[in-house]
Image: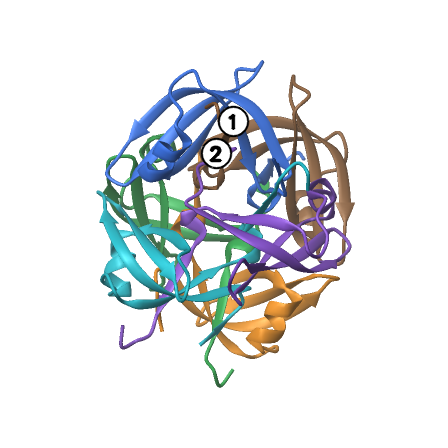
Chain colours: A cyan, B purple, C blue, D brown, E green, F orange
């Protein structure tokens, strides 16, 4: 499967929270302590079929990634 | 500075590409070989004031992070 | 703190609504009657540490801003 | 025309920049000095049919609006 | 009403789910069996004023559309 | 490959435009005359490895889909 997002990193699911319509899945990037979160609909979570410990890939389009620099730059 | 994006990871700028209106900045997440890209306007790149080697933070809202799982799940 | 979003406007928090996983924060742009809303995870709301009356900055990437014109243009 | 974006503010086009595929349109929110930018394809700019001085509405989904607070909160 | 999103397709609302803050509206693209979903705040759903069977247009900015190709390409 | 976006529709590439940093790919949804566009970096276009006539899937997160209704609702 190829896609046109610049960002594609292997990760492991570490936490899943469910709301009324939405769900929040937190993952840890493989080989790091960095955590990232993805918010999705409960339907999508069900389709994805992941549980804590599952291996996934974190995908984000470059247009949706913001860079922040200290004032000293 | 606090913000309401779930994803906030330190990184180093490794490449900058400029087009007519847009620019693409590629970064390496600190302590890893993982690369991420951010696309922004040339104006924003100028405001950000970064060059190759600059330290930045990669910020992305959880709603814009997609998770992909193998069919075996 | 510098970032690479084109849109960055001072505002005041006027309302906070909390759901199961998500929260909606409504702000009023300083010196105007214009209101904007941001949706985030409850975790992010907690990290942000704002309450009604707090001063914040509204940040949005230009790629996520849509312009609508009347048919008469 | 009704839409499901929380953010909808009247504005005036003040600048248009064109690249190879993309274009950047800067607007000033009516009755303020606040400027916002929208990035779109050249095709979309053509469809929109605006020029400097045109009246538009700035529309952004609440999920794509980030709030930033000073550390003092 | 003209806007600067590349994607604009007529559809019919087929399902509405409501959570604490968010709502999910599923639509069927007119003349097809293709379904698409939109997530919005409950406030936005109320403003939109649609129910099952309502006619709407599905609008998405091209930067938020991801293309996926099989490995065989 | 499973992912957590609600919107996933088969399509055929009908046009590709390249700029300095970005590219615009227009597709036709299979079995319809509906066209959708995706904007991506040139790098991503190269990774995707598609040309006019290629079969792809159009994927968009529900949070990035806007619904527009006529005033009559």
Specify the label residue D70 is tagged with: 1
Residue A19 occupies quadrant: top left
- Residue extending farthest to the front is B31
Q: Position of residue E69 (x, y in %)?
A: 48, 75
Residue D46 visible in the current orientation? yes
The residue singled out by tag 2 in the image is B2
Q: Are marks 2 and 1 on the same chain?
A: no
- Badge 1, how many Cα within 10 Å: few under 14, some, many 20+? some
Q: Is residue E8 left or right of residue F15?
A: left
Above or below residue A71? Residue F5 is below
E36 vs D45: above or below: below
Q: Is residue E49 visible?
A: no
Position in image of residue B26 (x %, y %): 63, 60
- Which residue corresponds to the image point at 51% horizontal and 37% vertical from the top-left? D60
Mark 2 burial class by Cα count in 10 Å: few <14, some 14-19, many 20+: some
At horizontal 41% and vertical 58% (from top left) the residue drawn is: B66
**Of C71 and B29, the residue lying toward us:** B29
Label 1: element kind? loop
In the rendering, at what x and y percent does residue D8 appear? 52, 30
Q: Quadrant of residue F1?
A: bottom left
Judged from this view, the residue extending furthest toward the bottom is: E72
Q: Give the secondary structure at mark 2.
A: strand
Label 2 with label 1: CB-CB less than 8 Å: yes
Mark-to-mark CA distance, 2 and 1: 6 Å
Above or below, A61 relative to B50:
below
Q: Residue under mark 1: which chain is it in?
A: D
Q: Chain of mark 2?
A: B
Residue D52 is situated, as x and y percent measured from the top left of the image, at 77, 34
Task: Residue at 64%, 49% (x, y): give it.
Answer: D40
As rendered, which of B42 and C72 lies closer to the eye?
A: B42
Which part of the image, by quadrant, shows the C terminus of chain D?
A: top left
């Amino acid at each position: 499967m190829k896609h046109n997002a610049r960002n594609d990193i292997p990760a492991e699911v570490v936490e899943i929270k469910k709301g009324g319509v939405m769900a929040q899945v937190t993952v840890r990037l493989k080989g790091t302590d960095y955590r990232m979160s993805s918010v999705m609909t409960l339907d999508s979570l069900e389709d994805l079929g992941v549980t804590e410990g599952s291996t996934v890939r974190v995908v984000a389009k470059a247009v949706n990634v913001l860079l922040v620099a200290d004032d000293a730059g």
